[in-house]
Image (cartoon, rainbow, N blue to C red):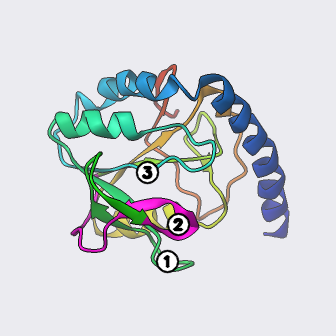
Amino acid sequence: MADLAAQKRAARKVAGSIRVEAHAMLGDTAGASLVEAGRAVFASMTPGTVSGFFPYRSEINALPLLAELAKMGWTTALPVVIAPAQPLVFRSWQPGEATIAGVWDIPVPVETAPEIIPDVMLVPLLSFDAQGFRLGYGGGFYDRTFASLRETGTVTGIGVAYSAQEVDAVPCGVHDVPLDWVLTEDGPKKPV
């Protein structure tokens, strides 16, 4: 386990630098490209509930995609960190609605917004591989959330990243949950 933790720490350092570079080059246009990539994936799905995220640091901006999904009839939401080592909860939110500062000052829906359970989760990441594994920040929030939601039903996990964030193999353990899709500015990728 210590070996895996060290591998992930080293991978996070490299992946963070790569994402910063990709964001500097593509940050202004990548969000619009995600809309096109998202249409290709979501066109075959029946609209339900989708959670997105506010971009943090150098994360790709998924808000234009979330706005497009709302136009397509999806109910949209944002994740909220409730406590360390706990799954995320999701509150209803549409692009343009009011937010408050959440953990790490990331915008979240106001506290009176209803909690909902997503059918699809758009997930930020530091790196991803062809098998659909993702490297996150290390808090385990999304992995715990996937595990919790998949115990009670089906949830589709879609990573959202710059194409430069793809690596040969993400270090992963038994609790790491693969994604169903990854959307990048270059289009959708279905893990093998």
| Amino acid carrying mark 3 in the image | Phe
Upstream in the sequence, badge 3 or badge 2? 3
| Amino acid carrying mark 2 in the image | Phe
Question: Which circle marks residue 68 in the picture?
Answer: none
- Mark toward the viewer: 3 or 1: 3
Q: Quick check: 132 left or right of 52?
A: right
Residue annotated with mark 3: 53
Q: Position of residue 135 (x, y in %)?
A: 65, 50
Q: Position of residue 59 (x, y in %)?
A: 58, 42
Q: Quick check: 16 left or right of 123?
A: right
Question: Which circle marks residue 86 in the picture?
Answer: 1
| Amino acid carrying mark 1 in the image | Gln
Q: Quadrant of residue 99?
A: bottom left
| In the depicted structure, whether residue 39 falls above or below residue 144 | above
Q: Position of residue 76 (x, y in %)?
A: 26, 50
Mark 1 element type = loop
Who is closer to the viewer here, 49 or 132? 49
| In the depicted structure, whether residue 79 falls above or below residue 57 | below
